[in-house]
Image: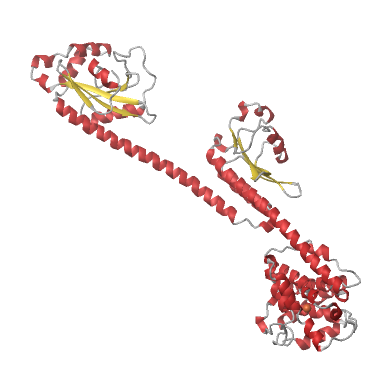
Amino acid sequence: MPLGTVVRSEISMSDLPAVASEQVAGTVDELRACTGLPFFAVRIDSRCVVEVAGQLPPMIPDCVREELQQLTHPKKWETNAGMVFYAVPFCVENRTRYAALGYIPSAKASVAQVTRCEPPADLIIAGSQAGWSARQLRHFWNECEALSGNVVERLITLAAEHLSGRSARLRLEDELDHVTCQLDHTYEEISLLHDLSRNLQVSQGPTSLADLCVRRLHALVDAGGSLILINDRSRRNLLHSRGVLPFEPRELETLIESFSDVEWSRPLVRNHVGKTLLGADYPRLSNFILVPIQEGQHRKGWVFCCNRTHGQEFGTVEAGFMNSVATILGTHVRNTELYQQNQDLLIGFVRSLVSSLDAKDPYTRGHSERVALIARRIGKHMKLPEGDLRDIYLSGLLHDVGKIGIDDRILRKPGRLTDAEFEAVKAHPTIGYNILKGLSNLQHILPGVRNHHENFDGTGYPDKLAGDDIPLMARILAVADGYDAMGSDRPYRKGMPNQKIEEIFRKGRNEQWDPNVIDAYFACREDILNIYATYSLEAGAPIDGSLSTISLDR
Ligand SMILES: [Fe+2]
């Protein structure tokens, strides 16, 4: 009989399963190698012989068959016919229970040579049913080493322990594989979230983050095509895609309409689209995952990946990645909206303050805007970063806001101020500082408001700072403020010509003003002249247009 052939036992001749697991065959071989005993395998629930490696004709006596169902440990049976039967139960990964069975001559029987020469009658029948010839059977029986029941018991106990060890090792290997796989996924997810978290600047809006998301997701889930759609505040859809999509990006919403009955509490995963009605409408769509970008009850957009490469299907791992991305995008879009609302509110506040100041002191109308623009131009020449330039501009707009707290009669006095009146006016930097210091979003502009009247030689006010102790923002504002104040008409004098102003600047270099800032002024004096001309009193103060373009972000 060829090795590995499946044969029928006397108890299951008509119902052999078409299953012969390699693991069962391997176990039978392993037990034989481990004990030196012959074995065949029986599936316990059906009592069918499923594996015989040509070691012996399958044979299950009544005493064994009756106990097979309850068998949990190795067991041996000795029969009156001079045979020792033995069984070792085991199961394979799918939890199907098997028993490795076998039999040999009993050592007791081997004493009687007559009995030993001829196989027992039951074995002759079993051998015949299994296709063994009488000669083969006699040879098998005489070659079998006779052992006592106790020896067999010890051997199968050792074999069972060997199997348990192997089983535990396989289980551990499976668990290790599983944990390793999960670790891989977790690492990828953490890496993805880490990348995304570094790009959550609300001042940049969702565009750059969405672009990063679609790039990372596309590679991570092996998608053929990926698309992120975001509904921004202006109700325009932002579309970011990668790879090849089976439809135009803007048609994603048409696909979504096909799932109007879905509650969208979790990602929608569809494989084998071609076998569904959807396949007729989207013949180039094989499979996809669709995840809503939610923030609370508000739908902010969609994350879509489709046509997984190499014929793979989408599963829970890919859906998990996309869900994480959608959650971050939803939160980010909402944060961006809140940030924009906050910024709009602040700009409105700044606009109100500047308007209030202009109304209070009409002689200096437009002064704040011009100082802000001139200071920004000087700062740009000094190669300050864009964030600092925004701060300088905003600080310029609000540098004299403290004058709101000065008596109108002093501010509007047509003649020269008395010493007492001048002392009152000198309080405006501190008053301005106190007005704004409670606003967390304006903290970074406070140095300009408080210290724009400090002199470089330490003779200014209110803190009598000198040199580099004066914040750079304030040193730049001091030059811009001086330029505009000297150039503009006042009730008690006409504005000075540029030549005169520059003469004063040269004289005050190192005394009233920072020499580096004065140098920067002279380097871009043409641009400053243009700013002054464009934003002069006659031209009005186009403050709204300028404010709408600034950002209060640091
Ligand atoms: Fe001032």
Left or right, 160 with respect to 544, comes to left
Q: Is residue 328 above or below residue 257?
A: below
Q: Quadrant of the C terminus?
A: bottom right
The answer to whether residue 226 of the structure is visible from this angle is no
Q: Find residue 192 and report its horizontal and vertical position in percent.
A: 56, 50
Of 148 and 449, the residue lying toward us: 449
Residue at (19% x, 21% y) in the render: 77
Q: Residue at x 37, y 29 (%)?
A: 95
What residue appears at the point 67 percent right and 51 percent down from the top-left corner?
Answer: 334
Residue 90: x, y in percent? 31, 29
Q: Is residue 505 left or right of residue 179?
A: right
Question: Residue 172, position in %: x, y?
Answer: 36, 40
Number of numbered discs visible in the structure rendering: 0
* Residue 381 picture quarter: bottom right
**Above or below — where is 267 with respect to 274?**
below
Image point 46% across, 43% down: which residue? 181
